[in-house]
Image (cartoon, rainbow, N blue to C red):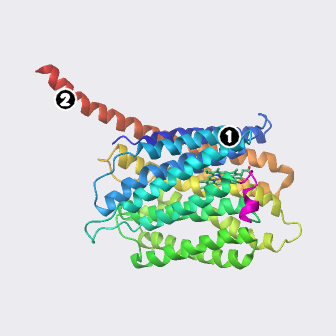
Amino acid sequence: MFNPYFLVVFLYIALAVLGALDASLINFELLPGFVGLRWMRVHFITLGALTEFAFGILPVLVAARVGVPRPKIRWDIWLTLNLGLLILLMGIPPINAALITTGGTLIFIAATLLMIQLGKMRATDTAQKSEGRKFYLVGLAYLLLGILVGTGLWQGWSTWLQIKVPIEVHIHANNWGFMSLVFAGLLVDLYPSFAGRSLAWPRSITPIFWMMTIGALGLVLGPWFQSNLFSVPGLILHLSATIWLLLNVIKPLVGDRQLRTPGMLHLITAYAWILAPVLVAPLIILQVSGFPGAGIEQNAPQALIYGWVLQFGYAMIPLLFRRIFLPDTPSKLGGNWFSLIAVHLGGIFLWVGIFLHEQQATLHGVAYGLWFVSMLPIAYELWQIVHNGINNLQDKNVVPIAAESGD
Ligand code: HEM
């Protein structure tokens, strides 16, 4: 089935590839910096690739799980999301308030419409249900909050919303709320198909869902009120839920070759890059002298986006592209050894650069260079899937035409 979101995902991954190359060349001073590109680099991945991907796959996935017919593509949602994104891409570099508000509002509307669509998909047979659906719905609710704060970030909205550290509220709502919950839902819904077995403790899914939901709330309210009374319990809850979910994924595969495939390792080890900022967080909170707290706050989000968000996508996006474009081929996660090693080395170089201030530009140049090359096999894999899928479709169309002309 033609799914226009997936072509856009491919387009933004191509832009993300160029964005990483550009960041690498800027660090090596081979290219001049361009205001606004920092925003684009992160949002090509978060909004352009992953949000777009989520919008494309969630209705199809939930419908399949609850046993209702595959929904027709909702062009209204596709158009509002993509118009919003294009308007933001125009509005963010010059910080044009009217364009940013319009773009943010359109994406907000698109997310609301998607929530309504998913909310209405109910199983007719009680035996069939999408365990992931509740994760997707709450994830999207956090996206709405993230959009609201993000859209108002440079427009003073945080003052009337009384947000103390708005950028962190934006990042936390989107990462710990939206991305974490959607990723968890995808793992829960898709693990049996790509791993060929069920999660270790299927009954743990509901407590994991609540721990993540409440944990993310604590992590959003923490910077909102600048209070560790929310952040610390939020972090503990969220992190414990994530570890519990990962154990659910890893335990059934212990001793199996599947655990050592690049795709599975991409999926699991991506989570190491969530742990990195968490491990240094106490040192920032305690303001340990000589510790580069400001450098971490400035650069850690990038490592999180490339190391975790994008890397999760390396495994998951090709899997679901295959499902849509090549439904007759076996379920297989994306990535190879090269992409796996390069993406992790990129994260290591970025973090080392934060601590070695003198060599920071070079180390960060190498980090983005590594992220750039790590994306190439994925972009190529996606291109091949789309290409073969379209060829198959054309072959199918040729048969009736050939038959007609033979009459
Ligand atoms: C309508 C949607 C969105 C708008 C209007 C928006 C807006 C913004 C703005 C204005 C910034 C500040 C950039 C800076 O200080 O240089 C920002 C940063 C950021 N946003 Fe968004 N954003 C949106 C969606 C998202 C989503 C969906 C995610 C993640 C899933 C996300 C993740 C981030 C991250 C990680 C940063 C920090 C980037 C850095 O430090 O370089 N945003 N966003």
Question: Horizontal placement of 53 versus 360: left or right?
Answer: left
**Most distant residue in the front direction:** 160
Q: Position of residue 89 (x, y in %)?
A: 64, 40
Q: Is residue 155 magenta?
A: yes
Q: Does 297 appear in magenta?
A: no
Question: Would residue 185 be found to the left or right of residue 308 on screen?
Answer: left
Image disc number at residue 400: 2
Residue shown at 59% from the left, 49% from the top: 105
Q: Residue 388, how many percent across, how many down?
A: 36, 36
**Label 1 sits on what residue type?**
Gly
Relative to residue 229, is residue 30 depicted above or below?
above
Neighbour class for label 2 at 10 Å: few (<14), some, many (≥20)?
few
Front one among 55 and 108? 108
Placement of 281 over or under 297, stated as above or below: below
Left or right: 300, with 256 as reference point = right
Marks 2 and 1 sit apart, C-alpha to C-alpha, by: 48 Å
Closest to the camera, between mark 2 and mark 1, is: 1
Which residue appears at 66% of the width and 45% of the height?
Answer: 100
Query: Please, is residue 226 above or below residue 2 in the view?
Result: below
Identified at 71% across, 63% down, the residue is 161
Amino acid at the residue labelled 2:
Pro
Q: In this figure, which residue is indicated by the disc labeled 1?
A: 91
Between 173 and 290, the one lying in front of the other is 173
Q: Which residues are magenta?
A: 153-162
